[in-house]
Amino acid sequence: MKNITLSIPGMQSSHCQSRVRSAIEAVSGATVENLAAGELTATVANNETTATLIQAIEKAGYKVSNDDEGSIQDKDIGCEG
């Protein structure tokens, strides 16, 4: 499992956030951790889940930003020990 943060510039209102949340809830292996204006933090099972999550967001009508600074930040939260 890992945490990812996605920049979603068009997701500003609570209505937009609700649409994105619904899209994410349909993705197996993804859990919303924080959803705020323009930004999503989620826990995903793997890179394939991340790709599916992005596709679901785009299908809901929102663009996931891909700038040079990297709109997708991930942090492995696997168990150590």
Image (cartoon, helix red, strand yellow):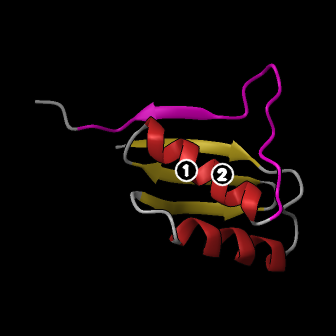
Residue at 20% x, 38% y is 79
- Residue 55's tag is 2
Residue that mark 1 sits on: 52
Q: Is residue 68 left or right of residue 49?
A: right
3D distance between C-alphas at marks 1 and 2: 5 Å
Q: Assess disc 2: are there few (<14), some (14-19) or many (≥20) residues with their C-alpha within 10 Å of its C-alpha.
A: some
Q: Assess disc 1: are there few (<14), some (14-19) or many (≥20) residues with their C-alpha within 10 Å of its C-alpha.
A: some
Above or below — where is 30 with respect to 70?
Answer: below
* Quadrant position of residue 37: bottom right
| Proximity of marks 1 and 2: CB atoms separated by less than 8 Å | yes
Residue at 66% x, 63% y is 35
Q: Magenta-highlighted stretch: main secondary structure?
A: loop
Residue at 46% x, 36% y is 47
Q: Is residue 7 left or right of residue 34?
A: right
Quarter the N terminus occupies: top left
- Residue 38's tag is none
* Residue interval drawn in magenta: 61-78
Quarter the C terminus occupies: top left
Query: Residue 23, how many percent across, how many down?
Result: 63, 69
